[in-house]
Image (cartoon, rainbow, N blue to C red):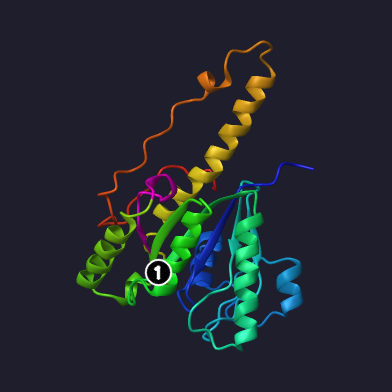
Amino acid sequence: MGTPSPQVAFAGRSNVGKSTLLNQLIHGHPDPMHRKITSERKKLDKPKVAPVSDRPGRTRHLFRFEVGGKLTFVDLPGYGFAKAPRQVKEGWISLVDEYLARAMQLKRVISLVDASVGVKESDEQLWEMLMEREHTMMVVLTKVDKVSPDTLNRNMAHVVSMLQRFDTKFVWPYVHAVSGMHGHGVEELRSSLSVVAWDASEGKALKGRRRATPGAANPQEQVPPVRSPPARGSVVPRTFGSRPKSPLD
């Protein structure tokens, strides 16, 4: 059995556009099923598409999507104003909390924030929890096609300002802005996520070289230098151009 692939979890308030973005990342289409209803059993047994719905809070389980054997996307239940009984909501919270505590292959958590709404208290609570558990976090603004450039820039600046108080070791230094419906910014996001797959493959290769070199020196001396991430000041690209070849391709 092969080594489990690194996991990237997607979290956000209900109706933040999480399923639409996942489908765009995986299939290049916001709704490959064209809103065709699929049974919960089929979605759990072999999820291929993130279920899209007009009703917030439809994601009630952890869905895992294998991406080319190099990454696993994990769709977490939405939080916030989902119309569900209190007992059900508490069950979702426990499910997510247990996953974050036990997921050994979790390499990054994508915090999705609606660009038309901005950061809410529930988003900040998620950030605090991720910092306490020392999970690397990336913030992505969604639904940018629904806001004006001024609103987007204002909310983007607010997010960057709020992230300053966290340990930079656990915060991806680039805040993405995307439209899952139209694909704006998705290529740049895929390139950033491909770093997770690349780091995992490089780590495996490094371990293999160490095993193949008897009597090697201090392993720490053989670790390749860390690549410098984009500067924190680089917020959202003004244009959506070409991207480098992605390991996810």
Residue extent of the magenta highlight: 167-180
Which amino acid is tagged 1? Val
Q: Is residue 132 above or below residue 123?
A: above
Left or right of residue 144, residue 11 in this image: right
Task: Determine the secondary structure under disc 1.
Answer: strand
Task: Name the main secondary structure of what is drawn in magenta.
Answer: loop
Q: Which residue is mark 1?
A: 113
User: Is any atom of residue 36 visible in this view?
Assistant: no
Q: Residue at x 19, y 70 (%)?
A: 150
The residue lying furthest to the front in this view is: 132
Q: Is residue 176 magenta?
A: yes
Left or right of residue 64, residue 21 in this image: left
Q: Residue at x 66, y 25 (%)?
A: 208
The residue lying furthest to the top in this view is: 215
Name the spot of residue 105 as percent of width and height, x first.
63, 48
Q: Is residue 163 above or below residue 89?
A: above
Name the spot of residue 49 as percent of width and height, x first.
62, 68
Q: Residue at x 31, y 63 (%)?
A: 159
User: Is any atom of residue 89 visible in this view?
Assistant: yes
